[in-house]
Image: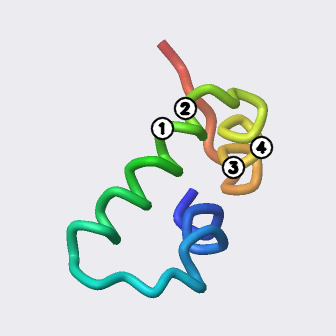
Amino acid sequence: MWSLVKRDIDNLAAADLGQVTRAVRGKLKMLQYRPTVIAGCLAGTGLTLSP
């Protein structure tokens, strides 16, 4: 997940830590609505979710 977030903020010229925080939170918020991306990240690790 972190690599996906870093791709979007790699060219961010933030004036302060608040801008970085907002950018990271915004990307994570977008990712939460893309379950296939999250599933792909989990599949890449070899881990599984079990109840």
Identify the residue under disc 1: 29
Task: Please report contact status of discs 3 and 1: CB closer than 8 Å, yes or no.
Answer: no
Disc 1 residue type (three-letter):
Lys
Task: Please report contact status of discs 3 and 4: CB closer than 8 Å, yes or no.
Answer: yes
Asked if residue 29 is positioned above or below residue 22 in the image, the reply reads: above
Residue 40: mark in rendering: 4
Which quarter of the picture shows residue 36? top right
Closer mark to the observer between disc 1 and disc 4: 1
Report how far apart the C-alphas of labels 3 and 1 lie in the structure. Answer: 16 Å
- Name the residue: 34% across, 57% down: 22
Element at label 4: helix
Asked if residue 1 is positioned above or below residue 17 in the image, the reply reads: above
Disc 3 residue type (three-letter):
Cys
Pointer 3 or 1: first along the chain: 1
Disc 4 residue type (three-letter):
Gly
- Name the residue: 45% across, 87% down: 13
Residue 33 spot, x, y in % from top left: 62, 26
- Local packing at callout 2 (Cα closer than 10 Å; few below 14, some 14-19, many 20+) is few
Closer mark to the observer between disc 2 and disc 3: 2
Identify the residue under disc 3: 41
- Name the residue: 59% across, 85% down: 11
Horizontal relation, residue 17 to residue 35: left or right:
left
Identify the residue under disc 2: 32
Residue 8 spot, x, y in % from top left: 62, 68
Residue 1 spot, x, y in % from top left: 57, 56
